[in-house]
Image: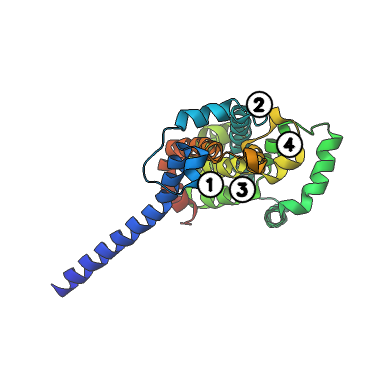
């Protein structure tokens, strides 16, 4: 009886802690949504639990600001983030498959080399990257924002670990015996098995690229090609006398919505992907 009471008390305590943590996480989203419905003067007066009446006014001001084209920024961010997620997941899975399913002399050095790239900060290679894309004529275009995602060491390592736990080599050997070529084996057999890992890394890559500010700020100069993080920074650094907090909160709300949609669409794969990818049988 005493053990049941102890177990019940621990369960209640766990639920209380989880409720508090959930409240702390969601409260800031609630503040964001409420402030997106209020005008600048109302926001300056302090926080309110009740929404305001300026939602459509703030949205109209954001959509019709010629100096900060938020709608084109959303389109650019969607293109860059979706392309980066697709390239990173597919080619990282392909690279991991090559190192996992084949035995060759430089297999270990190749794996170590990829891991060394993983620990290299982006800022270290930024100057060389800018010189490279300038020589290729890609400055002030969206291509340099997602093409480098083909080489994503962190995504590769996750895919490799997932294959070690979930992809038996006997299945690959059976496909080879049946006459399947390597790309057909990878696309028709390996990729379906890798679906949870691909979904997880697609979410992470999409969110990381969506929030990326450093590289787009170096590459993009035209307003029509800027991504959302650059436009939000430009909006916040505007003249204080023309600074509109309602517009800022509305832009941030618009910037978060696509991430929430992507998460909802792929969230059912997260637990399966993280669990299976992190456990080696």
Distance Cα–Cα, label 4 vs label 1: 36 Å
| Image coords of residue 70 (percent x, y) | 60, 31
Q: Residues within 10 Å of mark 2 (few under 14, many from 20)?
A: few
For residue 260, side relative to residue 185 (left or right): left
| Residue identified by numbered label 4 | 144
Q: CA distance from mark 1 to mark 2?
A: 56 Å
**Label 4 crowd (10 A; few <14 / some 14-19 / many >=20):** many
Q: Secondary structure at mark 4?
A: helix
- Picture colour scheme: rainbow
* Front of the two marks 3 and 4: 4
* Residues at discs 3 and 2 in contact (Cβ within 8 Å): no
On the picture, is 104 further left or further right than 125?
left
The residue at which mark 2 appears reads as 66
Q: Which marked residue is nearer to the observer: mark 4 or mark 1?
A: 4
> What separation in Å lies between label 1 and label 3 (alpha carbons)?
18 Å
Q: Residue furthest bottom?
A: 2
Tell me the number on the disc at residue 169.
1
């Amino acid at each position: 009886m005493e053990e049941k009471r102890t177990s019940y008390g621990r369960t209640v305590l766990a639920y209380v802690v989880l409720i508090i943590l959930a409240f702390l996480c969601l409260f800031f989203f609630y503040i964001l949504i409420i402030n997106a419905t209020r005008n600048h003067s109302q926001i300056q007066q302090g926080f309110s639990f009740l929404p305001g009446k300026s939602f459509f006014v703030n949205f109209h001001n954001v959509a019709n600001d010629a100096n900060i084209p938020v709608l084109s920024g959303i389109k650019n961010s969607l293109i860059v983030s979706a392309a980066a997620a697709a390239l990173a997941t597919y080619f990282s899975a392909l690279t991991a498959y090559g190192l996992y399913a084949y035995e060759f002399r430089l297999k270990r050095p190749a794996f170590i080399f990829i891991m060394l790239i993983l620990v290299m900060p982006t800022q270290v290679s930024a100057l060389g990257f800018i010189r490279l894309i300038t020589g290729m004529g890609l400055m002030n275009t969206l291509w340099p924002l997602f093409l480098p995602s083909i080489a994503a060491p962190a995504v590769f390592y996750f895919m490799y670990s997932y294959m070690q736990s979930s992809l038996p080599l006997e299945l690959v050997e059976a496909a080879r015996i049946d006459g399947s070529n390597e790309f057909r084996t990878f696309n028709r057999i390996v990729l379906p098995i890798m679906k949870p890992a691909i979904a997880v890394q697609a979410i992470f890559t999409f969110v990381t690229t969506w929030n990326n500010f450093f590289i787009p700020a170096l590459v993009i100069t035209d307003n029509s090609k800027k991504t959302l993080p650059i436009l939000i920074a430009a909006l916040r650094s505007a003249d204080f006398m023309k600074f509109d907090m309602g517009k800022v909160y509305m832009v941030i709300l618009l910037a978060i919505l696509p991430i929430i949609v992507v998460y909802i669409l792929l969230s059912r794969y997260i637990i399966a992907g993280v669990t299976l990818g992190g456990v080696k049988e």
